[in-house]
């Protein structure tokens, strides 16, 4: 999770995940989009 968006981590933590805050200011300063760094969670309980 982006360290500058702590409210985004709250719903994930409420569902049992353990979000790790990461400083992404270096990517933002280069005008890069963070979506290319995203991990899409999947349901592993199946």
Image (tube, rainbow, N blue to C red):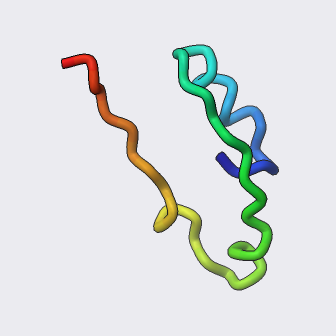
Query: Residue visible at 51% across and 63% down?
Result: 37
Query: Residue visible at 63% across and 35% down?
Result: 19
Work out whether residue 30 or residue 43 is closer to the camera in this orientation and state it: 43
| Left or right, 25 with reference to 10 | right
Image quadrant in which you'd find residue 23: bottom right
Work out whether residue 29 or residue 39 is closer to the camera in this orientation and state it: 39
Query: Residue visible at 69% across and 75% down?
Result: 27
Image quadrant in which you'd find residue 25: bottom right
Quadrant where the C terminus is found in the figure:
top left
Residue 9 x %, y %: 67, 33
Q: Residue furthest bottom?
A: 30
Residue 8 x %, y %: 67, 36
| Left or right, 46 with reference to 24 | left
Q: Residue furthest left?
A: 46
Work out whether residue 20 or residue 26 is closer to the camera in this orientation and state it: 20
Residue 32 x %, y %: 61, 78
Query: Residue visible at 73% across and 64% down?
Result: 24
- How many numbered circles are shown? 0
Q: Is residue 17 above or below residue 6?
A: above
Image quadrant in which you'd find residue 14: top right
Q: Is residue 8 above or below residue 31?
A: above
Q: Is residue 41 above or below residue 3?
A: above
């Amino acid at each position: 999770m982006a360290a500058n968006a702590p409210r985004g981590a709250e719903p994930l933590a409420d569902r049992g995940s353990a979000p790790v805050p990461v400083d992404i200011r270096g990517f933002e300063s280069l005008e890069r989009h963070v979506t290319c760094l995203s991990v899409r969670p999947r349901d592993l309980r199946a």
